[in-house]
Image: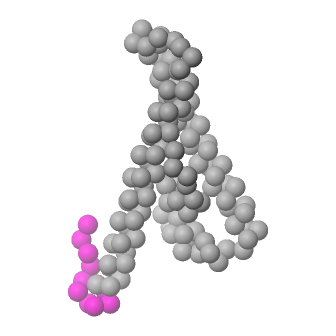
Amino acid sequence: MKKLTTLEVIKILPLEQNLKNKLLANWDNIDPGRKYGLVNILWDYYDALYEMRLKTNIQQALERVKIGKEKLSQELYKQARNKTEQEMEITVSQNLTNQEIQTIRSKLQTIITQSSLGPIEK
């Protein structure tokens, strides 16, 4: 799985958009002690989401075993973990792309507003 930065984690976590924007805009100016605490909280939140998704994937694999669609093997956990990592990578890339689009749209909106052409339609 791709190594993430804390800023990327902020972008992909299901946080209120206003909070995300504030964190991203002010990240470099946050007091180091407070930033340390935020980093721990954000990564704990990310890890909890990962573990929840992993648990779901393991349960689904066990259900497939139960109904005979899959055989119980030592690879079951590894397969569930790999599936979870793939899902998280997809989530990361989709959310980062969406965040980048929103950032570009916001910058374009600012430019257009300054040039008095009117708002951008979605």
Is residue 57 visible from the viewing direction of this image?
yes
In the image, residue 61 above or below residue 36: above
State the image coordinates of residue 40 (x, y, percent, origin top left).
70, 55
Magenta segment: does it hold 10?
no
Along the horizontal axis of the image, is 3 left or right of 34? Answer: left
Which residue is rendered at x = 50% and y = 33% of the image?
Answer: 82
State the image coordinates of residue 84 (x, y, percent, origin top left).
50, 36
In the image, residue 104 above or below residue 42: below
Classified by dominant secondary structure, the portion drawn in magenta counts as: loop
State the image coordinates of residue 22 (x, y, percent, origin top left).
55, 71
Direction right: furthest residue:
33
Along the horizontal axis of the image, is 19 left or right of 97? Answer: right
Which residue is rendered at x = 66% and y = 49% of the image?
Answer: 44
Is residue 16 visible from the viewing direction of this image?
no
Direction top: furthest residue:
68
The stretch of residues the image draws in magenta is 113-122
Magenta segment: does it hold 114?
yes
In the image, residue 87 above or below residue 101: above
* Quadrant into which the C terminus falls: bottom left
Along the horizontal axis of the image, is 31 left or right of 55? Answer: right
Q: Nearer the viewer, residue 73 or 11?
A: 73
Which residue is rendered at x = 56% and y = 36% of the image?
Answer: 52
Which residue is rendered at x = 61% and y = 42% of the image?
Answer: 48
In the image, residue 33 above or below residue 1: below
State the image coordinates of residue 38 (x, y, percent, origin top left).
68, 61
Colour scheme: one colour
